[in-house]
Amino acid sequence: MAFSLHGVHVPHRKHTAGMDAVRMDAPKTVTIPMSMHIGKPATPVVKVGDMVCVGTLIAEQSGFVSAPIHSSVSGKVTKLTEILTYGGTTVPAIQIESDGLMTPDPALAPKEIGSADELIDAMRDCGLVGLGGAGFPTYVKYKVEKEKIQELVVNGAECEPYITSDSYTMEKRSEDIALALELMEKHLGIKKIIIGIESNKAKSIESMQALAAKDSNVQVKVLPAMYPQGGEKVLIYHTTGKSVPLGKLPIDVGCIVANVTSLAVLGQYVRTGMPLVEKCVTVDGAAVHEPKNVIAPIGTSMDDLFAFCGGLDSEPAKVLYGGPMMGISVPDTASPVLKTTNAVLALNKKEAALPETTPCIRCGTCTNTCPFGMAPASILKAYEKKDFEALDKLKVDLCMECGCCSYVCPASQPLTQTNRLAKAALKEYKAKEEKK
Amino acid sequence: MATLQISTSPHIHTPRTTRKIMLDVLIALAPAAIAGTIIFGLRSLLVIAACVISTVGSEYVFNLIMKRKQTIGDLSAAVTGLLLALNLPANVPVWQAVVGGIFAIIVVKCLFGGIGKNLVNPAITARVFMLVSFASCSVSAFPVADAVSTATPLVAAGAGNMPSILTLFLGTHGGAIGETCVLALLLGGIYLIVRGVITWHLPVVYVAAVFLFTFLLNGFDAANALSMVLSGGLMLGAIFMATDYVTSPSTAAGKAIFGVGAAVITVMIRFWGTYPEGTSFAILMMNILTPYIDSWTSHKLFGGAKA
């Protein structure tokens, strides 16, 4: 590798590091949205009044890019409703009242995997979506590209502040990860697997090294604790040395990236038949009384999570899905745990405070920090002028919205935020131009 | 339940702000200001006060009249004032210092839109303005007569009356308040690099290139080239003026180009120009070229995308 990509040393704030995850009691109700993935929302297959168990299919995949959804509790379907998503749209959701027993569906049984197709079907049937946060239905990328996979990059970087749920997975669920890797090697013919982990996670590294010791195709690559180490293109570059070009996918350079927790879910599904119904969620932030890693049924409300962590010490100023660098703020703490939720943070006023924006002093820190060498300050100027040609030239589409530029900007300019707007505006502009 | 804030990521921010950066620059300039006061006497403090009060005051009044948000809190006007003072001789008339300060802020900075929008460095432009406007200032700033600070290098070297390297390093010779004590300037420069306010590229390339060009043009005399590097306004300019964010390139490559360009102009003026010293003019000219340098040296984008 010629050089390391730039990034920032964000504060770690991993208060829950090394803590064992605690399984919470069944919440009274869960609200499971039909869209917890990229693609078409799943179609409900249950009606109000139906009795379901943990792992019972409640909504089926609708179309190629979609994912099935399973009940996360045992109990009764009480409502087919709609909830407001963080994106401002509404999405159908199924509300289930728990009987408190968490009875697994009796039909669930370990899976026999004898071929690549069966493995890919298993990825689909367990409802797996990219758990690193993207939420793209996992099976799709393997189904479409399985011949082209040369290297599997396993993402254990967990570079966001606060979050330790992937570390928990690596430390405590290495057997499920090993099983998933073994199946991929056997049926997809993958000969090279690199697990990338940031150097600040000694226990995770130890656990994954023990796994690698038993499998000559697997190696662990310890990476500097530098955000955004877990960004897909960044991770591929730092583990394999390959650069994914603009507008291309990892598979175009022969790589596929799997998050450690995604692998553990697949392994568990094959081992026990239990699909993706629960998540280890890091519940943290200064407003939370007792930060914990909580194993929670999907659909559990944030309110229930906070209650399980001793409640909130102060009124939260901001509540996030995910970490503070790329996480999404929610308007309402009734928001449920999603498949892709790896953390729920309740930030107090002080943590959520952002400095006031002052004029750009052209210090260049943004461009010298951007992992991809982009020029966020120039993009902001071009966007303000609605200069789409300049935006195109500045390759705003390359931006992964990691947040580094905004984080480092001494003038607190909304750089990442503007990149996001500029990407959307440029897309719209290009679509219009094509029509002409 | 109270209303939750909604915003797009990122949700945390570095503690670094413009104000803290400017404060670091003020701290880094302190050794030079103290050394200047020791070398040139208490009148130095009067000049510093005149400049800082006039720069901060004129920015305050400008914002007040124009009904703009007050910006003096970012401390950049104070930095401009201090830098200007350090570029002036201790015996400069106070009214001239005040005029210089007002010119720096009003004409060079505020009329272009305030902090971040100026094309050229306010302090350096004000220095050049004073140099061409006030003959007394120019003469006292560059005491050619005693040939210590910035006599035409060839003349000084030829006459064999350059001060010793140690004298140049400690700055106990004629010149502007803050430019003579190389030791103090280096301390400030190291502080700025350690604090991550500036990178080494621009000052090191600039100074090294001046050394090299002087060495080549002046009979391969390393000792003389070193004297040239340690004299005049080069160190103050290279460390504190050329590295001004607003008016210098953003990338390492751009900073290096700026450094080489500034060195060429500095040496040309020193050797062949009418003025004894060329640092201010060199930086001013490179300020003007900065947008072009920036566009030539933008980063290579990841994945081979062409910007």
Image (tube, coloured by chain):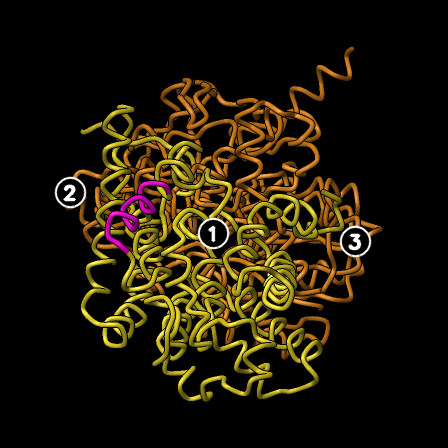
Q: Residue furthest top?
A: A436
Read off the chain for label 1.
B
Q: Which residue is mark 1?
A: B245
Q: Amino acid at mark 2?
A: Ser
Q: Residue at x 27, y 46 (%)?
A: B98
The verdict on a common chain for dots 2 and 1 is no
Span of residues in magenta: B93-103
Q: Which quarter of the rendering shows the N terminus of chain A?
A: bottom right
Circle 2 SS class: loop
Q: Which residue is mark 2?
A: A314
Read off the chain for label 2.
A
Q: Is residue A359 above or below residue A220?
A: above
Q: Amino acid at mark 3?
A: Val
The answer for how far apart the CA atoms under marks 2 and 1 are is 41 Å
Which of the numbered marks, if any, corresponds to residue A253? 3
The part of the image, by quadrant, that contains residue A302 is: top left
Q: Specify the chain shown as orange.
A: A
Q: Position of residue A42 (x, y in %)?
A: 57, 26
Q: Nearer the viewer, residue A303 or A382?
A: A382
